[in-house]
Image (cartoon, helix red, strand yellow):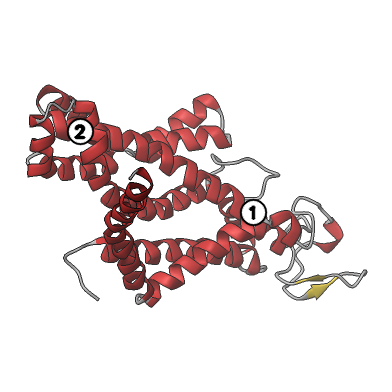
Amino acid sequence: MSGAAAPAGTLTLRGERSPAVREWLALVRRLVRRRTALFGLAVMLLTVVVAAAAPVLAPFDPIEQNIGDRLKPPLWSDEAGRRHVLGTDHLGRDLVARVIHGARPALLVGVAAVLISGILGMLAGLVAGYFGGYADDVLMRLADIQLAFPFILLAIAVIGVLGPSLPTIIVVIGVSSWVVYARVVRGSVLSLREREFVQAALALGGRDGRVIFRHVLPNVFTPWLVVATLDMARVIVIESALSFLGLGVQPPTPTWGGMLADGRVYISTAWWLATFPGLAILVTVLGINLFGDGLRDTLDPRLTV
């Protein structure tokens, strides 16, 4: 008897999982039909691979200086026959190596800051939307104060006190970007807490914490994920802007924003110094935005392809 019951239970479990599997397959098919989203995903994956394999892919040391080879144009070859595909900068450093290594701080700041701000905003939105009342008022007033304060002034003040470094930039951007997540999650929770399955869980004696993390959180994760994907592009631009102003990761570590700052002085005589780092920022941010738009449209049940 017991031997016959086990297969039946297994079949039932598989039958219960199949709708979820079919739903995910349907979402993947909808995403595949969006060519712009696939292009964005390909750009994101390529950027991640380049950043992860930078020591292998870079043809030269990104911080090695050779004043005799300074400001050489693209496709120039040195005395040893080594070709500098994108040329060299004002200190004779290979631009290909610096662009490749510059992807590392950009992605690191983007991912880490989004995780910090996303988690803070998720928790704030869950508490404000589910409990309401005093907690909602306090958190939303804090969000209004955060939005009223210019971010660049906050970043300059904090970095000026603590000093420019990678951890400082991550914390500053992460702590100051939680508001958009909190508002999106709060709006979703306000509608979810009145739904039948939430009310049924409470009527059956479910505690608030269990209801929030078991029933509410999975249903607000989708809009949160879309916001996080799109926000990563904004964070990369902010990191580049701070590096351009000299408040980001300090030399000799290569950053795209720092390379733009170095190249602006030579824009009329050595156009490649600012052009290629700018293109790297443009393509990366464009790819993330395209994938985020496609992900949003794919996960929105009101839209069809």
Question: Is 154 on the left or on the right of 89, as rendered?
Answer: left
Name the residue furthest top. Answer: 134
Label pair 1/2, CB-CB below 8 angstroms:
no
Residue 272, picture quadrant: bottom right
SS at mark 2 in the image: helix
Q: Report the disc number at residue 52.
A: 1
* Residue that lies at the very extreme toward the front in this rendered image: 1
Residue 113 in sight here? yes
Residue 300 in picture, x, y percent from top left? 22, 62
- One can see residue 145 in this view: no
Spatial separation of the CA atoms under disc 1 and disc 2: 39 Å
On screen, residue 171 above or below 56? above
Please name whichever residue, 31 or 23, is drawn nearer the observer in this view of the structure: 23
Disc 1 packing (10 Å; few <14; some 14–19; many ≥20): some
Reading the image, the residue beneath label 2 is: 211
Classify mark 1: helix, strand or loop.
helix
Residue reaching furthest right? 80
Q: Where does the image place residue 148, in percent across and percent down from the top left?
A: 24, 36
Residue at screen point 28% across, 52% down? 222
38 vs 83, left or right, is left
- Asked whether 200 or 183 is in front, the reply is 200
Amino acid on which disc 2 is placed: Val
- Along the line of sight, which residue is nearer the eye, 143 or 228? 228
Name the quadrant of the C terminus.
bottom left
**Rendered residue at 23%/27% (across/down):** 209
Q: Is residue 245 above or below residue 297?
A: above
Q: Which mark is residue 182?
A: none
Inspect the image, locate mark 1, and give the three-letter code of the amino acid beneath it: Ala
User: Picture coordinates of residue 141 (x, y %)?
Assistant: 18, 29
